Amino acid sequence: MKPAYKKILIALVIAAAIVLIRVLGFDQLLSLETFRQYRDQLLAFTDRHYIPTVAIFVLIYITAVALSIPGATVLTLSAGFLFGFIGVLYVNIGATAGACLAFLIARYLLGDWIQKRYEEKLASFNREIAENGYNYLLTLRFIPLFPFFLINLFAGLTRVPLFTFAWTTMIGILPGSFVYIYTGRQLGIIDKPGDILSGELLLAFILLGLLALSPVIAKKILKKNTGARPEL
């Protein structure tokens, strides 16, 4: 089979998988309401079958990220009340592995073609990426200026080495993951309306608010820095 046909076949398989997941409604299961509804059952299953639960969780996370299916945020929150703070590790494994798969898919399907097609125009860009690519990726991961899946796909079209992409993703998502894990842990212990006003949950919401505002704050700081621009 010719390389071009292989790429087309892989693209069709991925597209079919995404459509099938949406048609069957599996993506709808990745909602906070679903996890809240089955909280007790999920916690009981996790207590009885901890290792299998972790394995299933990581595989679902990898699939969701690799196929750019919405739900990673809810999965991270659910890791908080299912596993506690150790869930940061499981989320990091799932998110990093899924992002690397999306990165490789984008590079294999389109990356090489774009680099060859626009080789001269991308020469200076590739040199910049080779020298400072890790800075750009860390900035985008620490400060979520763009959606997670877009960074995975865009990076795959560049000359960024897979190793650089992997370690910057692994480190860059830690702060945000910790905030969501902490919030999920607090949401998981709500048993009565009065719990909503607990100091721990209020702190979780404050941290979430600061995380959501971080791109805006970063842009304002960069604008004040004598005409400096965000390095995107």
Image: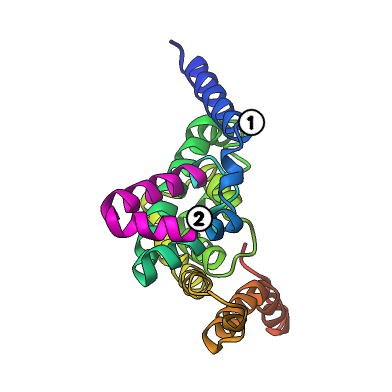
Nearer to us of marks 1 and 2 is 2
The stretch drawn in magenta includes residue 61: yes
| Residue linked to disc 2 | 38
**How many other residues sit within 10 Å of disc 1, few (<14), some (14-19) or many (≥20)?**
few
Task: Give the structural element (helix, strand or loop) at label 2.
Answer: loop
For the stretch drawn in magenta, the main secondary structure is: helix
Q: Residues within 10 Å of mark 2 (few under 14, many from 20)?
A: few
**Displayed quadrant of residue 202:** bottom right
Q: Observer-nearest residue: 117 or 90?
A: 90
Q: Quadrant of the N terminus?
A: top left
Closest to the observer: 129 or 153? 153
Q: At 50% across and 74% down in the image, what residue appears?
A: 179
**Mark 2: amino acid:** Tyr
In the figure, 126 relative to 39: above or below?
A: above
Residue 141 — which label?
none
Q: Is residue 215 magenta?
A: no
Q: CA distance from mark 1 to mark 2?
A: 23 Å
User: Residue 24 sits in which quadrant?
Assistant: top right
To which residue does mark 1 refer? 23
Whether residue 156 is visible here, answered yes or no, is yes
Q: Nearer the viewer, residue 138 or 121?
A: 138
